[in-house]
Image (cartoon, rainbow, N blue to C red):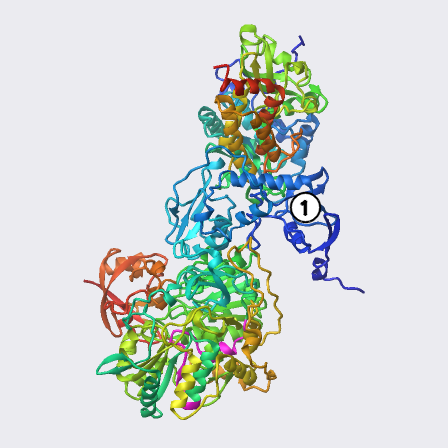
């Protein structure tokens, strides 16, 4: 008997006729896409392949034969069906399309010479291709005030707008930020911001990118370049671990803008505003010289002489660095590295283990998850998370941590109607599309996991037995089709709580998959390259004698046990939650800082080695799902900054040793040859979608669509190709590598945790913000003003109990002392909890919660008192 | 002159000053049709309406019975009454909502019972201040009377009606824009497919959208039977219709006239109705079915008032509004004013209507007020052709909804029928009638 599966039925092609020629379309395919594949491009404006069609601009009208004869239908809105007969090139179609184009131009101003879109404008391009040479419109054109600010970053010129609704649809449909909408009617219709709320979407730049005319412009790019003067490479955004593919454009050695590239498995064309608008943090602050300022780029090597950092030659700096490390003997450690390329991380790993002979290596800052546990979990890709019938989130607000991942997951709930369950101290940005939000306070994640597994609910938690029963029904027995999105929601709570919860889920639901969401740019690459205690390059582990993680290293530094520390990145103080410990540690240790940016950490540096950053770098990075993509450099680094591979190699030479890595390309080759990790192969092809580690999928480069993503130039070859000059290595077979991490190996030696809860205190929920006071934000003029003030938020019950009003100053006492903070009413914060944004304050802020919390405690709790 | 023997179906209480009160309504047989309907099976009620061959009175003239039969089976479905009558010179629903709101309510309940729908919305033009007040009052009284609410008149049928005022957009009379507005969104017409609200309507659920006058016919149809209704009129055009007569007639107003049996000449000239042209001047032209419809000249005065009869001559009976121009009327000004209306009321969603209506309006303004050029006539006709390709009837369209092809009707009629008057305007440098 023949078995016919649903998938077979769905894949049966649909036979249609386009301009008299037979064509096999895909089932459910839009006519405009089928026609394009058949070689008949249909002009369009409102249509965008990443949004639902609306058929409003009418540019794509074609003749479709139907029951009432041939009628004009919008090709972007009509799906193909069997036997459909379509004409796209008749006189009638041409007249209709020309008519629409003429209508669109009627009120469109003729200011192309001063319009940012000129030269990359779909309206301009299609007018050139199809439009009449002369206008018949002799009336006065419509007038609006030019331009208006619709958000902090976006300006709107309503005269240029052709009402395609791409921006309003993106805001409502993709981002869920409906603060812009149409107002008025007839030809005086306009896109308008909400009268009550500004367009403060963290995705606002996407509306500018997809605008098919020059109506929307972004403040940072406006009037800064002409498109034909820009040079472009394809690269990867390293603002977070999503790994959005971008077109990086520069004018000479000046970065001008980045645009989102449509990478199907990752960002699908979208970017967040932090990724899009922080270019000036790389090359925009040339006038700054204060090395304690994080906006300052480091141009020369420096050593400390008489208490001051002074510029020296590379040779002198390297010698000094080697001396400092050599003097410390075995009492050394390495902290940081999660913003390096894979090649940089690999080079430093070789230096640390091979030259310094230390196991004290940690790319994370005590704010992430156990590296071995991450490697041991069955991994889900972003696509698998989006396709999961049930998605359980146990993490911070994804919109604040990994914005483009939020867009993808939101789509899963909105478009595909999948269930999202939140386990969170407060409803996140996904809450309004989630099936359920279970209130899980700090210190309770492991209890919630047990409840979900067993069905029993302990006393004194805020989630109910009904909610647990609902969640259990959605997860099922084995967790099939379930993806857990897990991360570190609360930096003020030890990772052991959430790690215990993750282990419970992984052991109880063997068919579930996990997407861990560590935030920092290439943290996954750093872990894969072995920058973590016990982890070795290529995702292998060492069973015995693991070294110190960052928090242990800080303790050892403070106690004088760890005498010298190599800091990969200048942002230790910005990233460790416990500022008291971090400061003590830095004061007591001799520190070598390898960094592209300045920062307060440099006040404790003995030697500073300047490195290239961002779009200055060649190499590969690995995103949160294990996808390796290529970074292609666009500009040169400032001064005499070097790539990390070169710094590590040269520093090794000072020890009279070699790490055997001559260049970034050579490093990629060694990585691939020794571990099978796809570094060189990705670097050589630089294929848009990169390559999954251990993945066997072949991804196809999506054709460039200048109508959907204007401004991105098609590049014939994005890879290095023959320029690399090294031959591809023979891949290492799986199984010949080291031992892989398993859940059992992670479990060993770990105890169950029961934090002591103080009924009179408030549990601290220290949560991340996209707009924090980090390096990228401090260096970016456009975004710096968007950082929220440091406050402590409480439920009204707790406010009343303490006896203060919202806005009052309170004394906050924690493990490391007292500070004074402004209290704010927020009833989304559960009772018994206080929420504080992490890292929004200046490091010089004395009244920072980070001064009083203790990184070694399982759970930080504070007492609030009126002043 | 024809004999006007047909019964008054929807305007039977017109002689009573207090026709809108429940007391008068009950005293004149009100709510007995509903009680009769509740004693029938819902299918029987629907069958009577089908037998009546009642054509929708909103403008498109789609048979109400067929619309009902298309309602997708679903646990949740809606009935929406379209009372967003906003076109210039169309005021029959205005009359019905002010003068006989209980008849509308009773008809609506009958329809809801036939459809087994228990949630009804009456979407009314927001500017109908008195009509809104009276319909809301009637709804309140119907609840008190037991005709609305839980288990009405002791039956097993429960129903709620919500009266929703529109916010002043003509486009919300387009049924899918109306549904969008009811959902709290901007009143943009939905793009087709899906073609029918009966499949995907309010909140995505199956929804029947019927006009106020359509609903108001139902009590009579149930009381007297569908066959009695179908016996009136001829062919597809059965029963009577309300005509809103305006323009240069002696007695403008709303008149109930049996379909097909009477002609436009009867309506305009009979002393019971229009009573002829003011000052007994000659009639120059008339619009047979509202400002969306192409115009007719005096040669078609003897055309019967029937849907198909009017359609055959290239126009439509539409919303039942008849507008009369006399020999002194300026057709250029009339066409410009009508275009201005459409330009102001275009929702702005799709390009040809948004930009075309504004462009044509500006060109028509110049032709009427000075600054017109002879080539403007060809230009305007070509712009109209880009909205409604072929300028034929029934119209084709490049737009999402039928507001688009409504724009050319008056402009094209005026230019085709009275080209010389346009030339006169151009040569005169403005309107010779001023």
- Of B102 and A826, nearer the camera is A826
Q: How many marks?
A: 1
Categorize mark 1 by other alpha carbons within 10 Å: few (<14), some (14-19), many (20+): many
Is residue A807 shown above or below A367?
above
From which residue to which does the magenta span run?
A354-379
Left or right position of A46 against A438? right
The verdict on residue A737 being magenta is: no
Badge 1 element: loop
Q: x, y percentage for residue A719?
A: 55, 71
Can the viewer see residue A532 in this picture?
no
Specify the principal SS of the magenta part: loop
Res. B92 image quadrant: top right
Q: x, y percentage for residue A149?
A: 37, 48
- Name which residue lies at 44% across and 84% down: A349
Res. B230 image quadrant: top right
Q: x, y percentage for residue B17?
A: 48, 15
Q: Quadrant of the C terminus of chain A?
A: bottom left
- Of B226 and B127, nearer the camera is B127
Give the residue at mark 1: A88
- Name which residue lies at 55% across and 47% down: A46
Is residue A736 shown above or below A9?
below
- Name which residue lies at 25% across and 74% down: A816
Q: Quadrant of the N terminus of chain A?
A: bottom right
Indicate the chain on which mark 1 is placed: A
- Of B2 and A755, nearer the camera is B2
Is residue A376 shown above or below A101?
below
Furthest-right residue in view?
A: A1
The verdict on residue A357 being magenta is: yes
């Amino acid at each position: 008997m023949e078995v016919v599966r649903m998938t077979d039925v769905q894949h049966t092609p649909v036979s249609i006729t386009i301009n008299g020629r037979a064509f096999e379309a895909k089932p459910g395919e839009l006519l405009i896409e089928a026609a394009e594949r058949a070689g008949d491009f249909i002009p369009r404006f409102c249509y965008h392949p990443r949004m639902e069609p609306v058929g409003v601009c009418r540019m794509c009208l074609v003749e479709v034969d139907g029951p009432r004869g041939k009628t004009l239908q919008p090709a972007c809105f009509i799906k193909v069906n069997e036997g459909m007969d379509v004409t796209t090139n008749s006189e009638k179609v041409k007249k209709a399309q020309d008519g629409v184009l003429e209508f669109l131009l009627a009120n469109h101003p003729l200011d192309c010479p001063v319009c940012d879109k000129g030269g990359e404008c779909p309206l301009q391009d299609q007018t050139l291709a199809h439009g009449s040479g002369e206008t018949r419109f002799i009336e006065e054109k419509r007038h609006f005030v030019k331009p208006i600010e619709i958000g902090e970053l976006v300006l709107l010129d309503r005269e240029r707008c052709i009402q395609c609704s791409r921006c309003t649809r993106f805001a409502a449909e993709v981002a869920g930020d409906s603060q812009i909408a149409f107002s008025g009617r007839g030809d005086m219709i306009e896109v308008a911001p909400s009268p009550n709320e500004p367009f403060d979407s963290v995705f606002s730049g996407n509306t500018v990118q997809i605008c098919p005319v020059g109506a929307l412009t972004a403040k940072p790019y406006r009037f800064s370049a002409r498109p034909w003067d820009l040079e472009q490479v394809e690269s990867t955004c390293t603002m977070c671990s999503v790994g959005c593919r971008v077109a990086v454009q520069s004018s000479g050695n000046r970065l001008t803008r980045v645009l989102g590239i449509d990478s199907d498995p990752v960002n699908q064309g979208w970017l967040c505003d932090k990724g899009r608008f922080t270019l000036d943090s790389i090359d925009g602050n040339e006038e700054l010289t204060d090395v304690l300022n994080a906006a300052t780029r480091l141009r020369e090597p420096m050593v400390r002489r008489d208490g001051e950092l002074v510029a020296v030659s590379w040779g002198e700096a390297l010698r000094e660095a080697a001396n400092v490390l050599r003097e410390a003997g075995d009492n050394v450690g390495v902290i940081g590295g999660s913003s390096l390329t894979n090649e940089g991380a690999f080079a430093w790993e070789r230096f640390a283990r091979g030259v310094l002979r230390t196991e004290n290596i940690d790319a994370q800052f005590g704010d992430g998850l156990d590296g071995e546990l991450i490697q041991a979990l069955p991994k889900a890709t972003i696509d698998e998370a989006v396709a999961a019938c049930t998605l359980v989130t146990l993490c911070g607000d994804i919109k604040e941590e990994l914005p483009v991942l939020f867009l993808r997951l939101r789509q899963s709930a909105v478009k595909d109607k999948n269930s999202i369950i939140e386990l969170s101290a407060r409803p996140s940005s996904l809450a309004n599309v989630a099936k359920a939000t279970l209130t899980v306070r700090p210190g309770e994640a492991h209890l919630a996991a047990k409840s979900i597994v067993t069905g029993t609910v302990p006393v004194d938690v805020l989630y109910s037995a009904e909610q647990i029963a609902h969640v259990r029904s959605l997860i099922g027995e084995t967790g099939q089709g379930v993806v857990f999105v897990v991360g570190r929601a609360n930096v003020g709570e030890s990772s052991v709580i959430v790690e215990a919860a993750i282990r419970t889920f992984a052991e109880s639901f063997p068919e579930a998959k996990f997407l861990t969401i560590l935030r920092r740019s290439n943290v996954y690459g750093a872990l894969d390259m072995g920058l973590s205690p016990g982890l070795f390059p290529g995702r292998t582990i060492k069973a015995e004698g693991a070294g110190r993680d960052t928090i242990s290293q800080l303790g050892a530094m403070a106690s004088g046990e760890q005498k010298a520390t190599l800091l990969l990145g200048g942002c230790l103080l910005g990233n460790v939650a416990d500022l008291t410990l971090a400061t003590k540690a830095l004061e007591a240790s001799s520190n070598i800082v390898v960094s592209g940016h300045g920062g307060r950490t440099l006040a404790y540096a003995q030697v500073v080695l300047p490195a290239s950053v961002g779009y200055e770098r060649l190499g590969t990075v690995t995103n949160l799902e294990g996808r390796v993509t290529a970074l292609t450099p666009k500009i040169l680094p400032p001064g005499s900054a070097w790539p990390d591979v070169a710094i590590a190699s040269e520093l090794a030479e000072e020890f009279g040793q070699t790490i055997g890595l001559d260049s970034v390309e050579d490093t990629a080759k060694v990585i691939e040859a020794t571990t099978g990790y796809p570094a060189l192969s990705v670097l050589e092809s630089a294929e848009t979608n990169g390559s999954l580690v251990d993945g066997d999928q072949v991804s196809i480069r999506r054709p460039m669509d200048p109508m959907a993503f204007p401004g991105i130039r098609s590049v014939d070859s994005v890879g290095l190709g023959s320029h690399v000059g090294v031959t591809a290595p023979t891949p290492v077979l799986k199984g010949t590598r080291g031992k892989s991490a398993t859940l059992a190996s992670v479990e060993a030696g770990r105890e169950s945790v029961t934090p002591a809860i103080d009924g009179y205190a408030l549990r601290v929920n220290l949560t991340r913000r996209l707009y924090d006071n980090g390096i990228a934000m401090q260096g970016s003029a456009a975004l710096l003003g968007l950082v929220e003030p440091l406050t402590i938020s409480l439920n009204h019950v707790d406010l009343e109990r303490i006896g203060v009003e919202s806005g009052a100053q309170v004394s906050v006492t924690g493990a490391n002392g007292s500070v004074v903070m402004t209290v704010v009413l927020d009833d989304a914060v559960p009772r018994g909890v206080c929420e504080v944004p992490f890292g929004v304050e200046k490091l010089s802020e004395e009244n920072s919660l980070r001064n009083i919390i203790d990184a070694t405690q399982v759970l930080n709790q504070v007492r609030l008192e009126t002043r | 002159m024809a004999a006007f023997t047909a019964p008054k179906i929807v305007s039977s209480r017109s002689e009573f000053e207090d026709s809108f009160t429940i007391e008068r309504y009950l005293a004149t047989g009100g709510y007995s049709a509903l009680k009769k309907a509740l004693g029938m099976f819902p299918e029987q009620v629907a069958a009577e309406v089908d037998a009546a061959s009642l054509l929708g009175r909103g403008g498109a003239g789609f048979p109400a019975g067929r619309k009902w039969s298309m309602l997708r089976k679903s646990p949740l479905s809606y009935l929406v009454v379209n009372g967003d009558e906003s076109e210039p010179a169309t005021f029959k629903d205005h009359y019905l909502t002010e003068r006989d709101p209980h008849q509308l309510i009773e008809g609506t309940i009958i329809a809801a019972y036939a459809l087994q729908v228990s949630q009804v919305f009456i979407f009314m033009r927001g500017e109908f201040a008195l009509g809104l007040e009276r319909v809301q009052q009637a709804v309140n009284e119907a609840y008190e009377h037991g005709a609305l609410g839980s288990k009405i008149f002791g039956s097993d049928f429960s129903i709620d009606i919500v009266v929703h005022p529109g916010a002043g957009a003509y486009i919300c009379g387009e049924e899918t824009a109306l549904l969008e507005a009811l959902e709290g969104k901007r009143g943009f017409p939905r793009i087709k497919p899906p073609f029918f609200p009966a499949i995907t309507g309010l909140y995505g659920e199956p929804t029947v959208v019927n006009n106020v006058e359509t609903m108001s016919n139902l009590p009579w149809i149930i009381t007297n039977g569908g066959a009695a209704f179908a016996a009136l009129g001829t062919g597809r055009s059965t029963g009577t219709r309300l005509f809103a007569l305006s323009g240069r007639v002696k007695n403008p107003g709303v008149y109930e006239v049996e379909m097909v049996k009477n002609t436009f000449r009867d309506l305009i000239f009979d002393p019971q109705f229009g009573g002829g042209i003011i000052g007994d001047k000659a009639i120059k032209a008339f619009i047979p079915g509202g400002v969306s419809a192409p115009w007719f000249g005096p040669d078609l005065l003897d055309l019967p008032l029937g849907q198909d009869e009017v359609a055959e001559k290239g126009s439509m009976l539409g919303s039942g509004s008849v507008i009369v121009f006399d020999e002194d009327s300026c057709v250029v000004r009339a066409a410009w004013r009508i275009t201005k209306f459409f330009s102001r009321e275009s929702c702005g969603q799709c390009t040809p209507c948004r930009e075309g209506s504004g462009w044509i309006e500006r060109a028509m303004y110049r032709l009427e007020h000075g600054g017109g050029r002879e080539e403007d006539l060809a230009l305007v006709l070509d712009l109209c052709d880009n909205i409604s390709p072929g300028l034929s009837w029934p119209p084709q369209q490049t737009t999402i909804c039928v507001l688009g092809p409504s724009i050319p009707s008056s402009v094209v009629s005026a230019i085709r029928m009275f080209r010389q008057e346009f030339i006169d305007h151009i040569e005169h440098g403005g309107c010779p009638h001023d």
